[in-house]
Amino acid sequence: MADPKLVGKLVLKGKLSLKTPLIIGSGKNDLSDIEALKDESGTPYIPATSLVGVLRHMIEDKSRRLDPTQSDYFWGSEKSDGSQSALCCHDLRTEGATIKIRDGVAIDPAKGIAVDEKKYDYEVVEPGSCFMMNMEITMREAFDKTMFENILATICHLLKEGKVALGAKTTSGFGKCKLEEIKFYDFDFSKRDDIFQWLKQDLTSRTETTLGGSPLPLSEKTILIDAAFSIKNSLIVRSYASDEIKPDAVHLTSNGKNVLPGTSIKGAIRARGLKILKTLGRTDAEVRINSLFGFVNEETKESRKGKVVVEETEIRNVAAELQQRIKIDRFTGGVIKGALFDSMPLWNSENGKAVQIKMSISEYKEWELGLLLLILKDLWSADLPIGGEKSIGRGVLKGVVAKIKWDSKELQLEEKNNELVFSNKELADDLNRICKEV
């Protein structure tokens, strides 16, 4: 480093609010297969490595294109002559977080049923939990302050816009967060008062400063499909009650609200995508699906993160209704004794939108857009059920309205009087051509 003289500190503080459940595993499995990371008092927290790692992955390539030397100063470098990162981030702590256990199960894509001995559960930190963020940037004589402020401005932009997801299962909608109550402080060590205030860590009397940088360009080639559906019959993503008084199975809730988890959507669209490619005679169907949705090979320990991102959404305009069912002996046709159970699925309480499904792919290929559109067609036309108890007609959706955004274009389609109406006929024809080339 040309001149390592310490000249100041930049401090960025804020409140990181969870918009979807968060999974950060601790490696322990006493209470569930995946336990949330907790401190000595049993309170969940987000390790600084999780946040900084995601931000570095999203920003570093862009910052290196502008100035590789200053980028290495900010993020640190593993080279033999590299420098320690100027960024120091504290672990993100909270006081009022709620933890809930969710159930999961592996589905056989060929049969569409649960795989034996593949049920698991995991702890999630519920949405609405707030974590305090505290970042400090050490400024030295050799550092470009404008460049550092531009990187900080990019971090603020990504977090304020909710474009950052932390922890596990982020492609299934987990870990989305948003930065609020942002405060920025600039300490100039050429000033005596700034030095004393920094040493005392006294920010109460410190005047906030406006962050002067501009966000780095982070444009991506992205598909976004945002579609609303009504529930044709009923829907249930099962959550099993431990209380004997409650029904055996109820619909999954988060913070007391009915939700459609991204895991249920992603599992269904992955299986349908594979079926579509095989029906079209693609010999590389599984390779394509693995590249698009990701995979984990337990035998070879190979894995790959998927490109398709789906979001967990609240289910609205529904009512839960208790239904009792019995199990039938398939040989005799009689009732099996002791096999009475009840469930409480959701039903549309009024006509219109009940379920919102959002799917996106960054840096996509044209065939990936086409496949996602074919999957949307099946969802729209009540041919692809979501959730549990599909064999008795649950989980069937019917399209109401959808928006498709790609390459700075936008197309809206809507069901009116049993006819599909497009906002732009030329764009609809263009998408139809893409679907035919899958």
Image (cartoon, grey):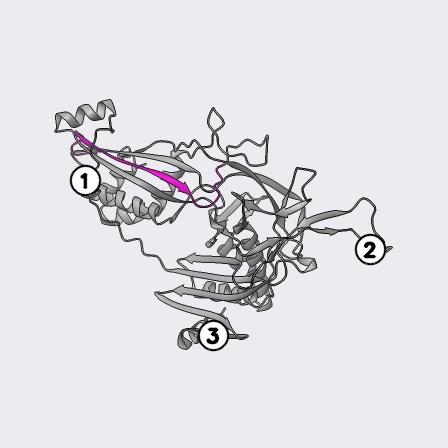
**Residue to which mark 3 is pinned:** 421
x and y percentages locating residue 181 in the rendered image:
31, 40
Q: Secondary structure at mark 3?
A: strand
- How far apart are the alpha carbons under marks 1 and 2? 74 Å
Tell me: 109 left or right of 327. Answer: left
Foreground of the two, 248 or 292: 248
**Residue to which mark 2 is pinned:** 330
Residue type, mark 1 in image: Lys
Q: Secondary structure at mark 2?
A: loop
Q: Quadrant of residue 13?
A: top left
Q: Quadrant of residue 34?
A: top right
Q: Give the residue at x 65% y 41%.
A: 241
- How far apart are the alpha carbons under marks 2 and 3? 46 Å
**Residue to which mark 1 is pinned:** 145
x and y percentages locating residue 415 in the rendered image:
51, 71
x and y percentages locating residue 75 in the rendered image:
29, 39
Give the residues drawn in magenta, as a range. 1-24
Q: Give the residue at x 50% y 32%.
A: 26
Foreground of the two, 205 or 223: 205
Mark 2 crowd level (few <14, some 14–19, many ≥20, 10 Å Cα)? few
